[in-house]
Amino acid sequence: MKHLFSLLILGLIVTSIYAQRWKPELKTDIPLDSIRLSDPCILADQATQTYYMTGTGGLLWKSKDLSKWTGPYIVAKTDPDSWMGPRPMIWAAELHKYKDKYYYFATFTNRAVYIDTVRGNEINRRASHVLVSDTPDGPYVPMKDSIYLPPDMPTLDGTFWVDKDGKPYMVYCYEWLQNWNGTIEKIELKPDLSGTIGEGKVLFRAHDSPWSKERDDEGNVGPNKVTDGPWLFETETGRLGMIWTSWVFNVYVQGVAYSESGTLDGPWIQEKEPITPPNFGHGMLFQDLNGQWLMSVHSHKSVNGRYVRIPHLFKVDLSGEKLVLEGPYQP
């Protein structure tokens, strides 16, 4: 597990340095499966009739048909004097339209600052944060609050949800590196998403999953410690669900949980089996411009010691009580 984690960090560092220090060459008519991108998130914007795809690395791609893409563009403008530092790593960026603004939810890491060392792992200053723009293609800039989540906690993969109480929330992971049993938590956001209100609340823990597994140093099999990539959705019957990603030994895969109360407070009941094929994960759901529900995920494999991650689309059926993954989708 430590070896896999080290390889993942190396790949993400390379991606983020690329995005922060080098102005990328603009390319056009690029097929989706020719793009190398972790944690792909697609915003289907009705106002511009355009798809906007982002993810790890702080880059943005645009498309009119989901088939051919133009990019990459650098759209995140962070404050070099903030806790993030001058060149933060950017992971798992998401775009969300809320009211009359567009918001950029992402994980930012300052590699020059360490907050803790646990079981030999040095933990960087890392947290989920939100930027804002008037347009979907940015630039996305900081808002009022410089800190959304506690500075002594490594948090990541923040996403957005408006709950039944009408209030906006960030749902995020408290990383396993520190607590050794990763959690998925919620925290209330200010009405304009410019900061947070109160403290985070645990929704569930990695060990609650019946499908994720790992071996400890003695070879004993138990639940995996990783929580990754939460995304909220509702079925057409109004049932609240969440997709999230972990591991089955060395296989990266995505599961799903459902809230019995229909709210973020749960309780959350985990499905017994993963929902995606092996080595597909960190998914999100969106409706294309014609109303078809799709899942965007990345494939995950190691090639010559480096992770290669490529965006993929799956067709989704949300008409019943559960999310049904129907198979690969070719636009």
Image (cartoon, grey):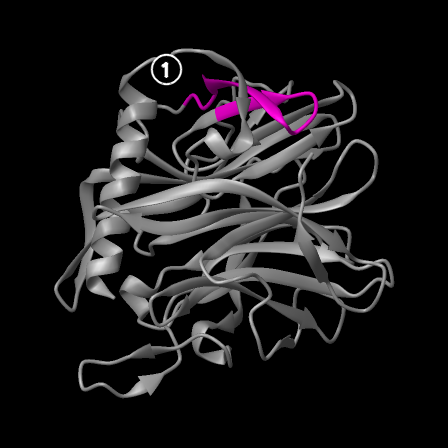
| Number of numbered discs | 1
- List x then y, in percent, for residue 74: 44, 19
Q: In the depicted view, which residue is nearer to us: 139 or 325?
A: 325
Residue beneath the point at 29% across and 16% down: 22
208, above or below 312, in the image: below
Q: Is residue 209 magenta?
A: no
Disc 1, SS: loop
Q: Main secondary structure of the magenta part?
A: strand
Question: Where, quadrant-wise, is the C terminus in this rendering?
Answer: top right
Disc 1: CA contacts within 10 A as few (<14), some (14-19) or many (>=20): some
67, above or below 281, in the image: above
Apparent side of residue 172 relative to residue 292 in the rendered image (left or right): left
Q: In the depicted view, which residue is nearer to us: 251 or 321?
A: 251
Apparent side of residue 140 relative to residue 290 in the rendered image (left or right): left
Q: Quadrant of residue 146?
A: top left
Question: Where, quadrant-wise, is the N terminus in this rendering?
Answer: bottom left
Q: In the depicted view, which residue is nearer to us: 46 or 105?
A: 46
Taking the image as drawn, is residue 124 in sight? no
Residue beneath the point at 73% across and 62% down: 324
Q: Is residue 75 magenta?
A: yes
Q: Which residue is mark 1?
A: 24
- List x then y, in percent, for residue 199: 50, 59
Taking the image as drawn, is residue 66 in sight? yes
- List x then y, in percent, for residue 297: 54, 47
Residue beneath the point at 18% across and 48% down: 114
Q: Quadrant of residue 326?
A: bottom right
The segment highlighted magenta reads 60-77
Q: Quadrant of residue 309?
A: top left
Residue type for callout 1: Pro
- List x then y, in percent, for residue 62: 59, 21
